[in-house]
Amino acid sequence: MEDIKHVNESLSRRGFKSCMVPDGQSALGTALGIIGGGSVGIGGSLTVKELGLYEALKERGNAVYWHWTDGAAAKARAAAADYYVCSANAVTRDGVIALTDGSGNRVAALSSGPRNAILIIGSNKIVADGREAFMRMRSAGCAGANAKRLGLHTPCAEYGECDDCTSPERICSVTAFFERPSKGLENTYVILVDRNMGL
Ligand code: SF4
C-alpha cells in the first residue's frame, strides 16, 4: 500500500487525475463512474479484460469499441470515442507512465486520441525508475508472456530473453514515456489498483 500511495501522489503532482483503489471491483466501479454515459474505446489490455469492463459497459448501454471482441475495424472507432481505456506496461515511483505497442494504438490514443483517457494499473507494474520500466517492458514476464499469448515467434516468447529483435512480429515497436498527461487530451485519469493485474 505504501508504494501505491507514493505513486499516486507522484502522478497527481505531474497532473494526472490519479486515485487508488483496493481491488478490481473498486477499479471497475470507479471507471464506470468516470465514464457515465460516454462512448468508450478500449486498447489491448488483460487488466481491462480481468475487470469485465467491456461486458459491464455493454450491459449498461454504453457504446463500446474493442478490437479484441469486435475486430480490427473497432480500432478506428475506439480512437474517436469519448473515453479510451487501457492499462500501462509500467509506472515509476515518481509517476512516469510507460507503454510499448506493436502498432502504437495505445500510445497514439493517449497522445492525441479521445478527449479522455483512463489508465487502470495494477501494483505489479510499479518500478523504481525509467530504466527499470524499460527492462520490465522487454522482460519475459511482460513482452515475452504477451508474445507467447499471441502465438508470436519472437525471441522473448521462444527463449524468454529480449535481443532487441527485428522480427516482423515484434510487439514493442513503439515505446513511450508519459512524464505528464498529453496536452492533446482534456483528462488523463489513472486508477491504481492495490492488486496484481495484467502482465
Ligand atoms: S524486441 Fe523482440 S525480443 Fe525484445 S521484447 Fe520486443 S518482441 Fe520481444
Image (cartoon, rainbow, N blue to C red):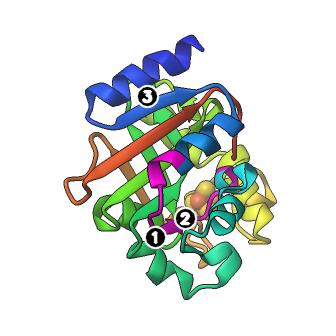
Note whether 28 is above or below 63 in the view shown: above
Residue at which label 2 appears: 43
Q: Quadrant of the N terminus?
A: top right
Q: Which residue is mark 3?
A: 129
Q: Is residue 89 visible?
A: no
Circle 2: residue type: Gly
Real-space CA distance between mark 2 and mark 1, rounded to the nearest whole angstrom: 7 Å
Q: Quarter of the picture for ligand 1?
A: bottom right
Q: Residue at x 47, y 55 (%)?
A: 36
* Residue extending farthest left: 183
The stretch drawn in magenta includes residue 128: no
Which class describes the residues within 10 Å of circle 2: few (<14), some (14-19), or many (20+)? many
Quadrant of residue 154 in the image?
bottom right
Q: Is residue 84 above or below residue 93?
A: below
Q: Residue at x 65, y 85 (%)?
A: 71
The foreground one among 195 and 170 is 195
Magenta region: which residues?
A: 33-47
Check residue 105 in the rendering and tell me which mark sits there, or answer none. Answer: 1
Any magenta on residue 41? yes
